[in-house]
Amino acid sequence: MLIYILRRIASAVSVVIVTLVASFGLFFVAPTDPAGTICGQRCTPERYADISASLNLDEPVVQQVGEYLKGLAVGRTYHSGGLTIECDAPCLGYSYTLGQPVTKLIGQALPVTVSIVLGGAVVYLIAGILGGIIAARRRGTYLDRLMVGTSLGINAVPYFVVALLVSLYVTFLPHAGYHPLLENPLTWATGLLAAWLTLGLANAASYTRYARASMIETLGEDYIRTARAKGISERRVVYRHGLRAAITPIATIFGLDLAFQLTGAIFTEAMFGLPGLGVLTLRAFNQYDLPVLMGGVLIGSVVLVAMNLLVDILYTILDPRVRLG
Amino acid sequence: MTEPQLLSTPNRRPETVSRARRVTGDRTEGQSYLEVTDLTVTFPTADGLVQAVQGLSYSLPLGRTLAVVGESGSGKSVSSMAIMGLHDRRSTRMTGSITVGGEEIVGMPPAELRKRRGANAAMIFQDPQSSLHPYFTVGDQIIEAYRAHHRVSKRVARDRAVDMLGRVGIPNPRRRLDDYPHQFSGGMRQRAMIAMALVNDPKLLIADEPTTALDVTVQAQILDLIMELQQDFGSAVLFITHDLGVVAEIADDVLVMYGGRGVEYGRAESILGRPLHPYTWGLLESIPAVSGEPARLHPIPGTPPSLLALPSGCSFHPRCEFAGRVPGAACSVELPDLVSRTDDTTRTARCHLSDPAGIFATDILPRLP
């Protein structure tokens, strides 16, 4: 098990490095001009060269990649117009446009996104799984058909449309905004409530169907009949014996959904004006802010491989028959 | 666990007692623990009414084993599920009477049914691989079964589970209790199922083809175990099978079912030795011989009838090679009653043939290996 995890972490690190190098290369090859953007409209060639040099943009791409990776591992030093700036490891560089360390920018944005995504996940997991169980137990009834139909309807519409509609109707909620959890948990929660409900409702539709399908399959299993034959309550049959087995495939989907949302809750963030990772990366993309963009790519790839690993480890906990190695 | 109501409850007899019951009802020693009387189980479906069990009657006293024999779809499993009250009430119609320990099961409120399920009557199933929950330990599942009917601490229930695992012959039960089902072999899983079924000391054990999914060598061990535990617990055993070899080994009484109805009922030795129904003959002829000359098998021609549209008259007549020997077209018109056909009143058969014993002796016996 431990050897398996170490091996997976090693392969995860190489996946992240390859992703970083590839993104770096693609961005470099693309027709972008970050120095020109920073320099502005009244740019002189001298100033342009100075900016290029301070951002190391005048170096060959291979060297830039090397310095970026070195900065990640041991930190690096920037020289800009006679100034020397130390950037400690893990150094993600400085934002071209905001002039701040990328680690700081991400450090501010990441908690916002994590708050939105995890809060939303609580909403859609509870609503979706309970909805799925209710539909599965009343399979074939009008309630079941209504729930499946509604779920399909919500999923048929693009997420941003659903999100926009929900945001139109949740105006009775407190004004959306991000307040750090540690400062005031109450304002943290009220500020994010609208985003949670939006993300939660749209995803609850899918999870209702996942849970329903998984539950119907499980409730048809022989061991459910055995459980009933013991004389335990139907509630216990469904929520202990049924849910315990039905949850495993849902956990897999959830792990990957979570990774996807952590890197791309961009509609939700943009709509409610929450300064999360998605908004940060989008802005960086529009302004050719390579270091910030690379930071986003780094976080995204780390989250994705980490969630994949977590799902696999979770499987050994959920299903005693699975042994990794 | 004692059953005080067992001896004091009078023998319930609803209005519609079939003739079979009148013939066989009084032959059993003492009071029967399980009484099935004119049971009908139907499932309304989109395609029509599935007549899974019709007019089924039998009785089973404590300490005896009744084997219910028949093909798939003969209603043998459905009737046993009915005894456990395991059918979905929304999709099942049931009439007639089932009494377990003198208590009527048909129409009993679900909560009452649940209290008795697993306590008075317990069930073991065909495939122990799929019948045990893969995500809970064996001990967890046995403890849950015990605590469903006994208000005891986890520790007490655990000791009871260890005790039961030991009794069904699992070595080192205290350690194996924390194993998951997949860590058990097939035979051990079925032993664990039996331990779970018997943990509440039920008076009735229903075994639904408990050896079908097991290796032949393990089958014999499980059969021995069930018989041994029946002796120890003094319980009644309802054994569902399609294997006449198993029947010969374990059964005191036999009920042969076809198309949802009982077609032959009596003591095991007389049914296996001198069967009176052409369907039972067919079952006997279908058994391959292990020794002697390799001979052609004699499968019963045709397929089991659809429970949506049973054949008219005797359900077996389209597959019966002796239907022509009955005068007129009685077999395809009139459903024969399950009544005594010979001097032996302890056994009944549902057949129009006037001399089934004679036909068996002259036509069937020479063909048997």
Image (cartoon, rainbow, N blue to C red):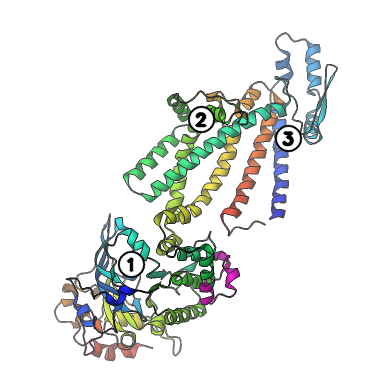
Could you tell me residue A16's position as x and y percent?
Answer: 70, 39
Subunit of label 1: B
Disc 3 versus disc 2: nearer the observer = 2
Distance from the alpha carbon under mark 1 to that under mark 2: 52 Å
Residue nearest the viewer, comparing B102 with B295: B102
Q: Chain of mark 3?
A: A
Q: Which residues are magenta?
A: B163-186
Kind of residue indicated by mark 2 = Leu
Decide: marks 1, 2 in contact (CB < 8 A)? no
Question: How far is mark 3 from mark 2, CA to CA?
Answer: 38 Å
Q: Residues within 10 Å of mark 1 (few under 14, many from 20)?
A: some
User: Would residue A14 be found to the left or right of residue B224 on screen?
Assistant: right
Residue B109 shown in magenta: no
Q: Which mark is residue A21?
A: 3
Amino acid under disc 1:
Val
Q: Which mark is residue B78?
A: 1
Chain letter belonging to callout 2: A
Describe the element under mark 1 as helix, strand or loop.
helix
Question: Callout 3, which amino acid?
Answer: Val
Q: Which residue is mark 2?
A: A193
